[in-house]
Structure formats: C-alpha cells, structure tokens
C-alpha cells in the first residue's frame, strides 16, 4: 500500500491517509479490507510524516520507507526488500482509496494466479475519463497499451476504459520490471505504469480486470474528494444495515460510522449520528437528532434528541429529549432520563426516574428511586470529586442539593428544597430548610405611599 506522499492539496497538517472517513482513518478501511481478504503480508510504504503513519498501522502491517518521493515505481522498489521470500503475487494499491472492496482485491489475486499472467491491471469504465490514463485491450482481454491523457489523440480521449493504478504482479516480473524503470519524464519520477510496457516488450502477458463498481476506486486528493468519498462510504454502510433489517427513515440524513453495530428491528430517525464502536440492540429507537459515541443501547430503549458518550443504556430505558450522558454513565432497565438532565460517571438503577432539570454526577443511584426536578449532586469541592450513593426506593424531592461525599440509605425521603450534608439512614425522613418567616409586605406598603406622594406633588391644573 503506497502512503508516502503527504497530500499537499489537502492543505492539512494531518497526513492524507490519516484523515477519517466514516469515523476512522482511511488507511484503516484498506487494512480492514486486506485482512478480510486474508493476504499473507501487508506492507505500507511511508515517506512524509512516516512516524505518524507507521504508528497508525502498527501491529497490522510491515513498514517500508521511501526516502524521497520519486514516483510510484520508486515507492514499490522501496517495498520489495520487505516482501517475504515465499511471495507469489503482489497487489499494489493506494492509501488514499479507502472504498476498494474485498471481492475486488480477491479477484485480482485469483486472476493473476489462474491465468499465469505477469500482471493484472484493474480497469474501470467511467462516463468522464478526463485526466486519466486510457487502457486499450485486445479481444482476449489482454492489455495492448496504456495511454496517458497528455499523450492521447482526440479519438483516444473518447475511450472510457481507464487505468485505476491498482495492479497484481507475479513477484519476479515486478522485481525485473521495476529495476528497469527510467525517470525520463518532465517530473523526473519513476512511474509504476511503465512496468506494463516493459513486461509486454519482454513477451509477458498483461491482462485487465474490470471493477464492478467504479465508485469503489474513488480516491482522495483534496477536501472536496474527501467529502465525496465519505458520502459514498456512508451510503454503503446505510444500505448494508437496511438489508440486515434496520429501519433508516432518512438515509441521507443519518450518519453511521464504519465500526458501529446494529441489530435487526432497530429504527434510526433523521439526524441520528452513531460514532465509534456504538452498539444498538433489537427494537431500540434512536433519534431524531441524537448523537451516540462509543455507547451501547440495549433492546427496546428509546433515545431522542440526546447525546451519549461512552455510556450504557439499559433495556426499555428512555433517554431524552435534550439529555446528556457523559462518559461512564450506566443507565439501567426501564430508567427515565428526561429533558435537560445531565448524567456523568454514574450508575442509575433499574426503574429509576430522573425526569427533568437535574445533574447526577459521580453517583450510584439505586433502583426505583425518584430524583426530582432541579436535584444536584454537588460532587466537586474545588479540589477533588466525591461520590453520592442513593439507596433503593428513595425519594429525592425537587431542588435538593446533595453535598458529596454522601450516602443516603434505602427508602429515605428527602423533602424538596433541602440541602443534605450528612449521611442519611434507611427509611429516614430529611428536611433541611431555613424556617419560613412570614411578615407584612412592607415593600408593597412603601410603593403605595410613594405613589400617593407623587399624586399630591403633581396637583391639578390650578396648581393647588
């Protein structure tokens, strides 16, 4: 896999192949494809930002270094010493084309080995071949010649079969032809395409295989092409899940990352974004306008107009609208997390309700607990975070402050407006309010006197 060039047209500090497509670097898409094919060895050719690219593929590929970027032929030459001695067929592809399918790579290997050809060229038929090299074939599918657009005649430019730049070689043929490449061009670079002419001159057989879907060879050179590839990838992901039994109401307005896992009978409503390694189980309904990151949603749960990050949502739980589950949140079965509730690094037991306008942070809340409107777990003392524990079957009234560290026993009742600073035993009743004082409304009386004074001062038209 060639990944040495930085990609200057991206205008980015990030190496081109490390830009994400549907949630992961594009080079990881290709690694996944090659691993699915079951190739014996993967070699990634690095150059610029080599440390970052090498780190991104660590443990999944061997590394070859192209010291100076002198063309695709030079990049392949740099990789040859890295290949295993028992290598038979080598497929060359690119780190900026993440949509290539496993079936296509497998067909390249098969075509090379079953025909005994020295090389197989992956071709595509495209409606607009502008800027691309044309491939001309004989009646048996052999490659007659490859003509770059700058060298093509007017008639040759009408030809729509193009060279994708992806090849499968017999190893000895690749070694021999790469060793004879010449940089006799304006760019002073060694082009891998020239190996095809060398092999034909030697009497070797070079054949072509047509890609089934030209979209899979789409590559990325700038941000517009990155968006185009992302759109294709997102469409492919959505289509695959719909065929697996997932309902996606508006696929064009639903964003599913490549590593997300969905079960049959999941429903995704418009505006849903599923990122990272999110898992959604049977019958769950997600959306509208919901973002889940590395979150697991169990069967039958409903999450709407909400954000959840690195959290777990139990069976038949309801989250939202306008709720936020921060990392480390675990919501039990049939729990209700309502509007404008924020939960952080907390465990919420089964059948508990936190219906609205509350903050639950660094807490362990039992089952069948009612957390009223405006409840706050005060978990930070300015230096450290502390936990709050609320026992099963407790009732926490509205506008209660729970000053951590704090333990509230099972069956406790905390009255509205209380500020709780001491631990509470089982079945205890807590009221912690400033005693109410009721006095005459002096403000109202003062306003009345003021109004009367103004009337007297103003007088009538005679001045009296």
Image: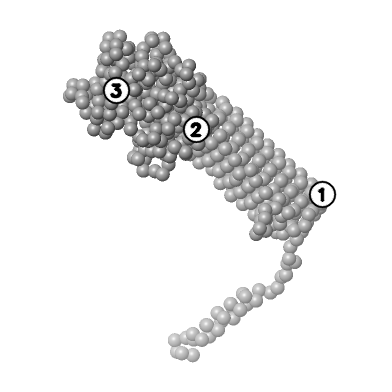
Q: Nearer the viewer, residue 380 or 20?
A: 20
Position of residue 308 measured from the top left corner of the image (x, y, whole percent)? 57, 42
Chain-order first, disc 3 or disc 2: 2
Instruction: Give the distance between the C-alpha atoms of the residues marked 3 and 1, in whole angstroms.
Output: 83 Å
Q: Nearer the viewer, residue 231 or 239?
A: 231
Which residue is painted at 56% across and 26% down in the image? Answer: 264
Q: Nearer the viewer, residue 174 or 343?
A: 174
From the viewer's perspective, is 439 left or right of 47? right
Numbered mark located on residue 426 in the image: 1
Mark 3 or 2, closer to the camera: 3
Position of residue 383 measured from the top left corner of the image (x, y, whole percent)? 66, 58
Mark 2 sits on what residue? 57
Instruction: Give the distance between the C-alpha atoms of the residues marked 3 and 2, in whole angstroms.
Output: 29 Å
Mark 3 sits on what residue? 194
Q: Quadrant of residue 205?
A: top left
Q: Is residue 361 visible?
A: yes
Position of residue 388 measured from the top left corner of the image (x, y, whole percent)? 72, 51
Check the picture and name the quadrant holding the N terminus.
top left
Mark 2 or 1, closer to the camera: 2
Which residue is painted at 55% across and 39% down in the image? Answer: 293
Q: Secondary structure at mark 2?
A: loop
From the viewer's perspective, is 335 left or right of 241? right
Q: Quadrant of residue 20?
A: top left
From the viewer's perspective, is 308 left or right of 136? right
Mark 3 or 1, closer to the camera: 3
Q: Is residue 355 visible?
A: no
Which residue is painted at 31% across and 16% down in the image? Answer: 199
Q: Is residue 144 above or below residue 289?
A: above
Numbered mark located on residue 120 in the image: none
């Amino acid at each position: 896999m060639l990944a040495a060039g930085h990609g200057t047209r991206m205008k980015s500090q990030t190496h081109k192949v490390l830009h994400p497509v549907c949630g992961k670097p594009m080079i990881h898409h290709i690694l996944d494809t090659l691993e699915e094919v079951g190739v014996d060895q993967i070699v990634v050719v690095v150059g610029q930002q080599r440390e970052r690219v090498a780190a991104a593929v660590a443990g999944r590929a061997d590394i070859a270094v192209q010291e100076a970027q002198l063309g695709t032929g030079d990049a392949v030459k740099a990789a040859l010493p890295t290949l295993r001695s028992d290598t038979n067929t080598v497929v060359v592809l690119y780190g900026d084309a993440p949509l290539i399918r496993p079936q296509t790579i497998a067909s390249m290997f098969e075509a090379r080995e079953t025909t005994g050809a020295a090389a197989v060229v992956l071709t595509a038929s495209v409606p607009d071949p502008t800027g691309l090299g044309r491939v001309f074939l004989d009646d048996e599918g052999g490659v007659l010649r490859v003509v770059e657009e700058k060298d093509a005649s007017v008639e040759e430019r009408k030809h729509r079969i193009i060279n994708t730049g992806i090849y499968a070689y017999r190893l000895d043929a690749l070694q021999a032809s790469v060793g004879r490449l010449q940089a006799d061009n304006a760019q002073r670079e060694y082009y891998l395409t020239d190996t095809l002419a060398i092999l034909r001159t030697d009497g070797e057989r070079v054949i072509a295989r047509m890609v089934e879907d030209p979209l899979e060879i789409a590559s990325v050179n700038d941000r517009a092409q990155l968006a185009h590839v992302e759109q294709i990838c997102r469409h492919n992901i959505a289509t695959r899940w719909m065929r697996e039994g997932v309902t996606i109401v508006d696929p064009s307005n639903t964003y599913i990352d490549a590593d997300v896992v969905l079960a049959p009978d999941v429903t995704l409503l418009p505006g849903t974004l599923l990122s990272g390694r999110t898992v959604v189980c049977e019958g769950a309904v997600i959306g509208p306008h919901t973002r889940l990151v590395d979150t697991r949603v169990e069967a039958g749960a409903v999450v709407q107009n909400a954000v959840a990050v690195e959290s777990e949502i139990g069976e038949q739980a309801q989250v939202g609208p306008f709720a936020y589950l921060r990392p480390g949140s675990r919501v039990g079965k049939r729990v209700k997390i309502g509007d404008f509730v924020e939960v952080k690094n907390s465990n919420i037991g089964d059948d508990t309700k936190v219906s609205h306008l509350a903050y639950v942070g660094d807490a362990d809340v039992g089952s069948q607990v009612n957390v009223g409107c405006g409840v706050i777990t005060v978990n930070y003392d300015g230096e450290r975070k502390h936990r709050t524990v609320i026992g099963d079957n407790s009732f926490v009234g509205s506008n209660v402050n729970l000053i951590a560290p704090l333990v509230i026993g099972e069956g406790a009742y905390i009255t509205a407006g209380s500020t709780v600073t001491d631990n509470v035993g089982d079945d205890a009743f807590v009221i912690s309010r400033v005693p109410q004082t009721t006095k005459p409304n002096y403000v109202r009386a003062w306003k009345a006197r003021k109004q009367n004074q103004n009337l007297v001062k103003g007088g009538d038209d005679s001045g009296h």
